[in-house]
Image (cartoon, rainbow, N blue to C red):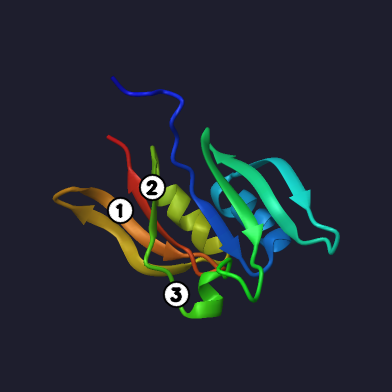
Amino acid sequence: MVDMTTTLQPRLIVSDAAKALAFYADALGAEVHSKHTDDDGLIVNADLTVAGAPFTVKDETPGTTDLSPTSFGGTPVLLRLTVPDVDALGARMERAGATVVFPISDHPYGRMGRFTDPYGHIWMLSQSD
């Protein structure tokens, strides 16, 4: 039996969380549900959702393991976001400032493409059936 209280939630570490929150709202339609800052004004946790799918964002903390992909030269993680209209979302991501890695196209396993956001995170956008 699956424990329905168990979740897996990506936490994106970025170089400028305030700008990243605006980017994710513009590019993905993300909604910010909460935001917490430290005494220096850095965002230590922001809870967001994209069509109900949760993720969190925080500012990087130099001198710790909490570094953004742009600070250490990339990320080995692909964030896969499946939506009803991948072409519309891909165009929205590009307009908001994401870089196309692989254009959206049809594959034997579905319609999808890859984009890198301005903070170094790679998004695999795919279309739901």
- Determine whether 33 is above or below 11 in the image: above
Q: In the figure, is residue 124 to the left or right of 108?
A: right
Spatial CA distance of label 1 from label 2 is 7 Å
Q: Which residue is mark 2?
A: 86
Residue at the limit of the structure toward the top, as seen here: 1
* Foreground of the two, 25 or 65: 65
Q: Secondary structure at mark 2?
A: helix
Q: Farthest right residue? A: 39
How far is disc 1 from disc 3 in space, using C-alphas? 21 Å
Eyeballing the image, is 44 above or below 14? Answer: above
Instruction: Residue at 30%, 53% (x, y): give it.
Output: 112
Lower sequence index among marks 2 and 3:
3
- Which of pointers 2 and 3 indicates the residue nearer the eye? 3
Tell me the quarter of the picture where residue 129 sits.
top left
Residue that carries the numbered disc 3 in the rendered image: 74
Q: What residue is rendered at 66% in x and 69% in y?
A: 61
**Three-letter amino acid code at disc 3?**
Gly
Above or below for 3 versus 99:
above
Q: Which residue is mark 1?
A: 112
| Callout in the foreground (1, 3) | 3
Between 51 and 104, the residue placed more toward the observer is: 51
Residue type indicated by callout 1:
Met
Upstream in sequence: badge 1 or badge 2: 2
| Distance from the alpha carbon under mark 2 to that under mark 3 | 24 Å
Residue at horizontal 58%, vertical 66%?
66
